[in-house]
């Protein structure tokens, strides 16, 4: 029983380390630029990138990727370099 509890704790620790890459809406980037950036930087499929762009537009932000900080940080930096507002939470 102790092993099961230990495994549950390890899984919860792994899950809590997961972060979200959030992209925010703005008034100057085009849909095409955001979609192209999500495809290139985040490795989204076209449909996924388009859906995220619409969510960003209508909701003001969208969680575009989930993972550990080390994986998301270069993506966030690349999006920021492309003029897209993004952060890791």
Image (cartoon, grey):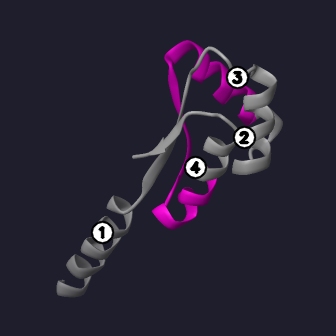
Residue at screen point 78% across, 43% down: 39
Label 1 residue SS? helix
What residue did someone put label 4 on? 76
* Labelled pair 1, 3 in contact (Cβ < 8 Å): no
Q: Earlier in the sequence, mark 1 or mark 3?
A: 1
- Give the total number of marks visible in the rendering: 4
Residue at screen point 56% across, 33% down: 85
Q: Earlier in the sequence, mark 2 or mark 1?
A: 1
Residue at screen point 21% across, 77% down: 5
* Labelled pair 4, 3 in contact (Cβ < 8 Å): no
Label 4 residue SS? helix
Q: Earlier in the sequence, mark 1 or mark 4?
A: 1
Tell me: 78 left or right of 63. Answer: right
Q: Earlier in the sequence, mark 4 or mark 2?
A: 2
Residue in front for this viewpoint, 27 or 48: 27
Q: CA distance from mark 2 to mark 1?
A: 28 Å
85 to 59, vertically: above or below? below
* Labelled pair 3, 2 in contact (Cβ < 8 Å): no
87 to 53, vertically: above or below? below
Residue in front for this viewpoint, 70 or 77: 77
Q: Earlier in the sequence, mark 4 or mark 3?
A: 3
What residue did someone put label 1 on? 13
Q: Is residue 71 magenta?
A: yes
Q: CA distance from mark 1 to mark 4?
A: 23 Å
Label 2 residue SS? helix
Residue in front for this viewpoint, 63 or 81: 81
Q: What mark, if any, has residue 27 been given in the picture?
A: none
Circle 1 residues within 10 Å: few <14, some 14–19, many ≥20: few
What residue did someone put label 2 on? 38
**Which quarter of the image is occupied by the N terminus?**
bottom left
Q: Position of residue 28 (x, y in %)?
A: 67, 18
């Amino acid at each position: 029983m102790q092993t099961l509890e230990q495994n549950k704790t390890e899984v919860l620790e792994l899950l809590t380390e997961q972060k979200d890459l959030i992209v925010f809406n703005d008034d100057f980037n085009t849909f095409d630029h955001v979609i192209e950036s999500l495809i290139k930087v985040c490795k989204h499929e076209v449909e996924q990138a388009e859906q995220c762009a619409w969510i960003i537009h209508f909701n003001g932000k969208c969680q575009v990727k989930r993972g550990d900080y080390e994986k998301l940080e270069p993506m966030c930096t690349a999006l920021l370099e492309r003029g897209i507002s993004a952060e890791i939470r």
